[in-house]
Image (cartoon, helix red, strand yellow):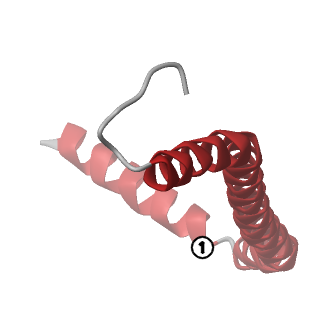
Amino acid sequence: MAFPTSVNDQITDAVTQSNVKVLGEAPAMAMGSMFQTMAHSTGILFENAVSAQQQQNTLAQAASNMGVMQIYSVDTMADAAGTEKVSQAGVADNLTSLLTVLQSFRR
């Protein structure tokens, strides 16, 4: 001790040792805190990656579903167009409208 004080030397030594202990443990505590923060950040990174993969899978499934629906509807649309051509349902409508126009000129 540099100069005498009214405090007992044992108390002064205990406080000094406590302060030295805290200063000695500070780097280890800081590194432990840093490792915990890095582990937490890595966990969040993986959670976001899994979420992005799930969204990508949902989009891919929706796109595949739409493609299959379009493939299946090609035959239906071709059948509908073929049926209209065979039955010539559009021709009757055209003839009816032409007859209506011709009758309007007769008056």
Which residue reaches farthest left?
107
Residue 2, percent across and down? Answer: 52, 19
Instruction: Between residue 26 and residue 47, name the one nearer to us.
Output: 26
Q: In the image, is 72 to the left or to the right of 14?
A: right
Label 1 secondary element: helix
Q: Residue at x 64, y 39 (%)?
A: 23
Circle 1 sits on which residue?
89
Q: Quadrant of residue 64?
A: bottom right
Please tell me which residue is depicted at 49% across the width and 59% down the height of the picture. Answer: 95
- Image coordinates for residue 83, horizontal then vertical, percent: 76, 79
Front-most of residues 3 and 51: 3
Q: Nearer the viewer, residue 74 or 92?
A: 74
Q: In the rendered image, which quarter contains the C terminus?
A: top left
**Residue name at image x 85 percent, y 75 percent:** 68
Q: Quadrant of the N terminus?
A: top right
Q: Residues within 10 Å of mark 1 (few under 14, many from 20)?
A: few
From the top left corner, tell me how far across and down residue 7 is, in percent. 34, 44
Give residue 59's quadrant in the image.
bottom right
Count the marks: how many? 1
Identify whether 74 is placed above or below 27.
below
Nearest the eye: 14 or 83 = 14
Question: In the rendered view, does 92 fall on the left or right side of 49?
Answer: left
Which amino acid does the dot numbered 1 rest on?
Ala
